[in-house]
Image: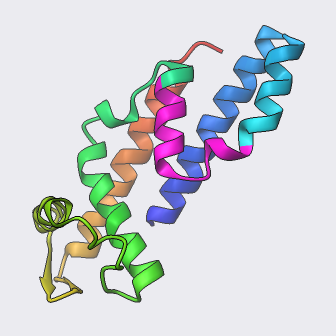
Amino acid sequence: MVAECEYFTFGRVRDVATAHVDAVNSPMLTKLYEKNKSAIDSTWPNALTFCKDSLGLSLRDLTEWEKFQHLIILRNASAHGRGEFTEKQLKNPQEVKRMLQGLSDVGYSFDGRRIIAYRGSIKDSSRDCRSFILAVDVATKALPR
């Protein structure tokens, strides 16, 4: 679910950026964009920074971002740690404390490094994903093209 949100969001950001570059019709901007567009959606930090700096849209300011960022953490643990937190995720003790609290807030708990989902956790997460996609859709449709 989170990967689908990522595909949607990164694709939408790229579509909006491409439309903007095409509308400006500047050879220099087009060349810069073509050279750097693959970095726009290579990571969440890149996409978030690009949105804010280049499009004037802070996805972090969407109310749905709070829950969704915790789901990204879960997806990374699932994809890269086989259901456990990765060494990278556990590197900073202060971040770990904040991360665990956030994940607890969205309905998950922990057994050491292992993530525990409860009845309804996945359903709630799917609703949070849907809410985030709808918020991104509305916010990006409002951008000038």
Q: Would residue 39 be counted in the magenta stretch?
A: yes
Q: Is residue 45 above or below residue 4?
A: above
Which quarter of the figure has residue 15?
top right
Q: Nearer the viewer, residue 9 or 123?
A: 9
91 or 101: nearer the viewer: 91
> In front: 59, or 126?
59
What is the magenta segment's predominant secondary structure? helix
Measuring 52% from the left and 55% from the top, which residue is drawn there? 6
Q: Residue furthest right?
A: 27
On screen, residue 54 versus residue 24, left or right, reads: left
- In terms of depth relative to the viewer, which is nearer, 97 or 52? 97
Residue at x-position 59% and y-position 46%: 10
At x 86% / y 25%, what residue is drawn? Answer: 31
Q: How is the image coloured?
A: rainbow
Q: Residue at x 66, y 45 (%)?
A: 39
The residue range painted magenta reads 38-52
**Residue 102, quarter of the rendered image:** bottom left
Residue 68 screen position, x and y as percent? 32, 53
**How many marks do you count on the picture?**
0
Q: From what the image shows, is residue 123 above or below residue 140?
A: below
Which quarter shows the N terminus?
bottom left
Q: Is residue 138 left or right of residue 22?
A: left
Q: Percent x, y for residue 46?
A: 53, 43
Does 8 sit left or right of 110 as displayed?
right
Q: Position of residue 110 (x, y in %)?
A: 14, 83
Q: Is residue 65 left or right of residue 141?
A: left
Quadrant for residue 27, please give it: top right
Q: In which quadrant will I find the C terminus? A: top right
Q: Position of residue 58 (x, y in %)?
A: 39, 28
Q: Is residue 45 magenta?
A: yes
